[in-house]
Amino acid sequence: MLEIWGLHKSFGGVHALAGVDLRVDEGEIVSVIGPNGAGKTSFFNVVTGLYLPDGGDIMFEGRSIVGLESSEITEAGIARTFQNVRLFLNMTVLENVMVAQHCRTRAGAFRAVLRTPFLRKEEAEIEARAKETLAFFGSRLVGYRFDQPALSLSYANRRRLEIARAMATRPKLLLLDEPVAGMNPRETAELTGLIRKLRDEMGLTVVVIEHDMRVVRDVSDRVIVLDHGVKIAEGSYDEVSSDEAVIEAYLGRPAEVG
Amino acid sequence: MTGVDLRRTLRWGSIAGAVMVFTCAVGLFEAFEDRLLVYPFLSLGHVLLLWFLPLAGYQATNEPVLEGMEAPSKGLHNAMAGLGAGLAGGILIGAFTVIIDAVDVRDVFVRLSARLVDLLTHGWGVPGGLVLLVAVPALLGMAGGMLHLVSAPVRRRLILALEWALVVALLEQVFSQVLRQLRLGAVGNIIFTRRALEWWAALAVAVLVAVLAERARGGIGRIRGYLFAADAVRRTRNSIWSALAVLAFLIVLPQLLGSLLSELLANVGLFLLMGLGLNIVVGLAGMLDLGYVAFFAVGAYTVGVLTSPISPRFDVEWSWWAALPVAILMSVIAGVLVGTPVIRMRGDYLAIVTLGFGEIVRILFLSDWLAPTFGGAQGVRNVPGIPVGVAEIRGSQPVGVLYFAFGLVLVAAWVSWALQESRLGRAWTAIREDETVAAAMGINVVRAKLNAFIVGAILAGLGGALFAAKVGSIFPSSFELLVSIIVLVVVIVGGMGNIPGVAVGAVLLIGVLGGPTQPGLLAEFAEFKLLIYGALLVFMMLRKPEGLLPSVRRSRELRGDELSQDAWLDRPSGGAEVDARPAGG
Amino acid sequence: MDSFLWVVRIGAIVLLIWGVAGTVVQGLSGQGPTGEAWRDLVVAGIAQGAMYGLIALGYSMVYGVLGFINFAHGEVFMSGGMVGFFVANYLWEVGLWETNFVLAILLVLLSSILTSTLVAVIVERIAYRPLRASPRLIPLITSIGISFFLQYTFAGLFGVAVKNYPPPPESLRSRISLLGLEIEGSKLLVIVVAVATMVGLYLFVEKTRTGRSIRAVAEDKEIAALMGIDVNRTIVATFAVGGAMAGVAGTLWALLFRGVSFITGFLPGIKAFTAAVLGGIGNLPGAMAGGVLLGLFEGVGPQLVLAGFGIPGVSQLKDVVAFTALVLVLIFKPTGLFGERLSAEDRA
């Protein structure tokens, strides 16, 4: 589904990505792990068109998406969340999810001004779909929450809303950047279940950047390890967690530490 | 903390003194000295000169009370500090008077004349009149300080009463006109003398307002609750009813106002139309367009050259209605031409570049190069009115223009509302909040912004078309940068992103102060209009960037208090009678 | 959308070449201005551009430090020119203007600098300081308000009439021969003063403690504060220096055009901002170079490009040329010809 060859991106003299190759198959849940500064978030930013890569190619469903606007990439079927949760804080919970359906709906200025039946129907659909998407997270984001501004949400709920917003773009591939950061163990366990549900029930392919190794172990079909912008290991959780290079990347070489 | 904080007192006193000196030096005092407000003793000049003193007196002991701290006790020291501040201000203006009396600086500062000294000293000359000149500010300062001694609700009522008495006196023209139309002209003749409110009538107004203030507050609260009902069906029904009520009011209003005031209100309508358009660009899509006048000019010139019988190049003599679609089309083209290159720019660069485009358009219309088409400095004359049935709407019949302008404003308000409550409106909000994320959520940012630009251009073009028919002749000098700025001030003062807000801004500013070339109710202000517009813009940005009637969302954005969750948690989530005041309001 | 921008780019270049070619053809056939007239246009352009450059420094420095366009800077410039007029007029009346022009013009310059500096600092204190934490369009809108407020305050204080400086002495009005070029004396003086001021500013920013603070604050306010720099004082210093440069420009304006009025600041202000962007905002030598370039565009452009199309009355269109230059620079190269120098947060 997603194939990447030789992806390069540098900022000034720092190579955030130094020739990464990887592929994600349809229906997989892949985790991307690595120490801080390994290039994980840069990887997401390049894939979603926020940054232009310096070299390499990104194929999504057999089509190169390098150089597309990030809105076009979303339209093609890739959605994401952000490491530092970037909601539209002054919009309501419902509006956050409604606005994300922008590229799947069509009514323009003319129809809006004339309030045509098409527009009314589409608006009703947008709202219904938004409510349905929010209901995916149980009772937390529904009911009176619909009309509250996103800034009134707790941290964990903001993370959930961000996932809901990404789901509302109707993606095929969902990129989650540290989805459980800042959550307590119970919330973490619950969200782990939801990530599996995203794949099993909604049929999404998911790539997760995560630091919490239990989450990585529980959800991943495959784990990819980045360090200094290079892929240093790939395989099942068990394979990767016993890999010499990975342990070294996380802990450093004993001799150097000493 | 009792006792007088001397430094604070002197600081406020000297600010008050500076305000008075400024008022005299730019000529505000002298210009309005003979415009009486309250017969026989208070003129507008006095108010402009002295308004800051009670405020300074109040501020001299106005300490913020922190939560958990004991509020400072009230007492004599409040009055003394107020007196001190007033006295300091009085001494400053007194010293200023002595200086301009002794040294003739008229060659440099044109307003500092012997007449000014005369007016300041109440005609009693320098040593004699000085006592009054120092004593009045001191007493006003003390009055301001003594406001601390009454409870907050009483204080609010006192201030409100004072404000209303002044407003009624200031808007004498409106009140006596309305009274005349209601066949109550006799009442007007009794309470107004020489355009000023009789002192006893002023007192009566003040007392009436003070008594009714609480009741009015309750009423406004109920109306708010009614309009912002939590239940969506009721909200829709209520807003339809209130829209009908507003419509009925608008239909009756011109009949009450007579032609002079209708003319003013027609200008309000014109600027409201443009304000609503600019509101889409600035308030909804978040782009600071300083060249908005360009689209206004394009609309006006298109209609002008197509309809005028003495149009320099085209002698088609179309009717206004035939020219209108062309004008709109030209506005759209102008919107695309200006919008496309600027939309990707940083917000502040966009502002300056649009300003540049606005000037380019004006200079081109003025140039000899395009004079064969647009008449250069001579402009386009004899633009006919708007044929409606057998009648014709033109500037000489302001009531007709007013109805027509109202009609266009309603269309513009509908367009604004409909867009705001649509997919496009949501996209604009998202872009304003975080452009990067909006793009990552599949919104084509450039296209959405361009849409806003085009809709704004159409409304301005419509305004231009109306303007051409209304004034009958178009000159490049009608399309100065000032127009853009004044429309911007209307939007900002009213409340960015809020349709009723823009309406309030247009009525207050264009109706009362006047537009760039159009006189307002206070036509005397013409010379000082832009000084006041500038000061107002600064004041609003410093104190109330969200405007007088803000949209809840916009006020949060502009104040940047995204983390103030508590304000929202305090709000009950149901019930019709919620006081819907925005956080921080 | 991008293709549209390409059309704009190519169209602009084609029109430019077409216009120049037309003018060249006209020139060869003996129409159009003579060589001498061209030289005068160039010199006038450079002199005016040098003045724009000095104003542009103020825009550039404030943008570099605070990240917003101080729209009222044109009025800061006007205030210096205006007060300078009264000093000049007084000196003319007492006779010093004619007996010792150098001393007189120095006094005028000093008063102009003091006024502009004072106005700039007061405006910062009252209007901009409370808005440091606001979204960036808020101080821009505020500065528009300040701009109008200052214009009409000056109109109220000193009247709306245009005030004409006393005529400069004969020696400045005549042409001076320099390296084989005949240059009008006052224009030469303007260029010399502008260059000297620029050198002084450069030394100030590079060598003094305050100058280093300004550079540090422009780079990163928080880190500068952590390094023990008084950020408030540094910002005031930035406004003061920018104001002083505008004050010098006010006197140069008087030498070039003699007349000042309360709206004198508006157009030069916008053009100086254009110059600052052209040279790369935050980049001080760039601002000066941008000013000179813009002055040249404006001085020569209408004759060189527009006349080639056979457009009548091209000199009316010199402001159009300047604004078009602004638009084109921001489309082609928004970071300016010599690179902008902004902290990361201001670039966003």
Image: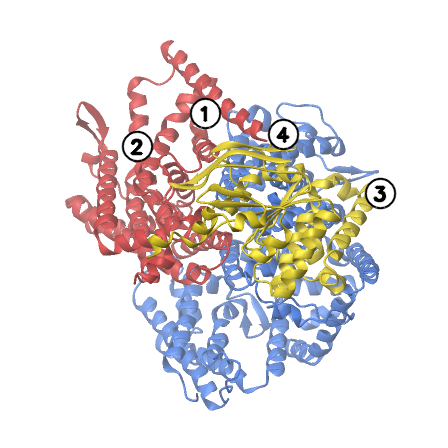
Q: Earlier in the sequence, mark 3 or mark 4?
A: 4
Instruction: Identify the disc placed on residue A117.
Output: 3
Q: Colour of chain B?
A: blue
How busy is the neighbourhood of tag 4: few (under 14 within 10 Å), some, or many (20 plus)?
A: few
How busy is the neighbourhood of tag 3: few (under 14 within 10 Å), some, or many (20 plus)?
A: few
**At which x and y percent is residue B93?**
39, 72
CB contact under 8 Å: marks 2 and 1: no
Q: Which of the 4 image quadrants contains residue B237? A: bottom right
The yellow one among the chains is A
Q: CA distance from mark 4 to mark 2?
A: 54 Å
Q: CA distance from mark 4 to mark 1?
A: 56 Å
Mark 1 and mark 3 on one chain: no
Q: Colour of chain C?
A: red
Q: Secondary structure at mark 3?
A: helix
Q: Which residue is mark 4?
A: A63
Q: Which residue is mark 1?
A: C313
Q: Residue at x 40, y 26 (%)?
A: C301
Mark 2 and mark 3 on one chain: no
